[in-house]
Amino acid sequence: MKARPFNRREFIRTTSVATAAATLAPTVLRAADASSPKMIGMQVGAVSFLDEGTEQVLDILQERGAVNTLFLAAFTYGRGIGGRQVPGQPLPDHGKQEYDLNFHGGNFATPHEKFYARTNLKPVKAPDYGDYDLLADVLPKAHKRGMKVYAWYEDNFGKDIPGVDAVQEVDLQGRRASTLCPLQPDYREFLIALTSDFCQSYELDGVMWGSERQGPLLNAIGAKVGGDDASRVTCFCEHHQQAAKDRGIDVVRAREGFEKLAKFMAAAHAGERPNDGYFVEFWRLLLDYPELLAWEKLWTDGKHAVYGDIHQAAKQSRAGVQVGFHIWHNNSFSPFFRAEQDYAAFAKTADFLKIVVYNNCGGPRYASYIENMATGILRDVPKDEVLRLNNAWLDYTNEAPLDKLPVAGLSADYVLGETKRALSDVAGSSCKIYPGIDIDVPTEAGQKKTSPEDVYAATAAGLKAGADGVLFSRKYSEMKLANISAGGKAVREG
């Protein structure tokens, strides 16, 4: 499984033939002593170090990307973060040239059971690579080079975790969902334990937690990429019902409201226009059932309380550890979700925020979001006008029309504007802003693919906006070397 480590001469000779090397190589292969004073991060999974050799990967990241900080995928059940490559996507020009069809996931470090005494959820070592410990392997080697190391983990849990069934969310019909309930004590204690384990068992410089989830009202109206089934929204478990009663929310009316909303959405998707129109009927439901918004607020407050738990657990473990959060890409598409992501509030429990501004895949994703809105609550409005309206709400002034978005992607101006907005929101606090830069995030056939020029422009835009650093994303194992080099070039010239 582990590739033979290259020596430095072999590394330079081999990587010099990558795409666009003719224009980038003079900058790429400059000695790493010109490192940026800002945080230049790379998200990396365990598979890359095993496939290519730890020292070789670190060489590539420093030489090509000017990377000085690693975000290691320490806990995930998602192939998008921890696996080698998404099946059907072009393979990168490094590592094993094969898809990872049997990715399982879990904890890619070593769980220490003493931290999990207060939760019925028990830690599971990822079975993918035997007893390999990602943090134990990479951290000392990176530190020796002067690179910082963060544990990167996400709100994505496997079915094999002992006790997980009991903390899964409950949908509108009383069925168990695959997601875990943010009001479940065992879930909260597990995240506290996981954070404490990382921060006390390893000399990490920081941690980053990510949760790509939103509340039941937004899921019901399909306010995200890909949409949702309004009849399966969550959570209606006993903890949410009790919390609702404590807030004076009528649980019966909340259920009734969501059931009517689910019927309305099904009819809207079928093109069955209400007499007064789609949006009027939606607004009437909100007026008749204010419990819909109340339940959304209840769920969202629970999610945001988790961020506070993680921050406190990390700081109690080691005061100097940096704590940050990955802000879901839906924040770039949905004004509804954006309203729930108050960066100024985040700054109270975060040393940094990684705002996802993936501009290449952002085009097709944004088009998908507009499609959802234009076939649901905004079905009265032509799709092009829905895009125009959404652009005005989000202050996007230089983006492609709807028929071109999937191929064009979003612009570097989008990266610039979103970074400036985030910086303005946290002004006066110590919270840093790191825009997440899209390098080969997968898209469908015929949709926007990443080029070196794209990466250079997006990286330069984030730095020009005044960001405290940039975070190359989603993961090294799916990136092309020339595109990493373009990011490094922008850093060194910035």
Image: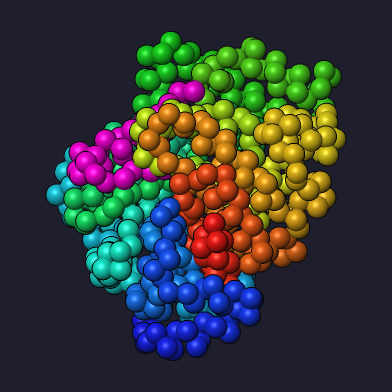
Of all residues shown, which one is farthest toward the left?
114
Q: Quadrant of residue 128?
A: bottom left
User: Left or right: 479 with respect to 409?
Assistant: left
Q: Nearer the viewer, residue 146 or 71?
A: 146
Q: Is residue 383 left or right of residue 2?
A: right
**x%, y% of residue 55?**
34, 76
Query: Is 82 a magenta residue?
Result: no
Q: Quadrant of the N terminus?
A: bottom left
Residue nearest the observer in this picture, 119 or 250: 119
- Residue 95 left/right relative to 190: right
Could you say which is closer to the camera, residue 324 or residue 187? 324
**Does any portion of residue 280 appear in the rendered image?**
yes
Residue 136 vertical placement versus 244 (above, below): below
Residue occupying the point 64% across, 12% down: 288
Residue occupying image coordinates x 66% and y 51%: 412
* Whole-percent x, y for residue 239 in the image: 36, 26
The percent position of residue 143, horizontal first and vertical second, equals 27, 64
Looking at the picture, how far across and down is residue 51, in whole percent? 41, 78
Q: Quadrant of residue 309?
A: top left
Main SS, magenta residues: helix
Q: Is residue 298 magenta?
A: yes
- Residue drawn where x is 61% and y is 61% of the image: 456
Describe residue 155's horizontal placement relative to residue 257 as left or right.
left
Task: Give the magenta part as a residue range.
Answer: 297-326
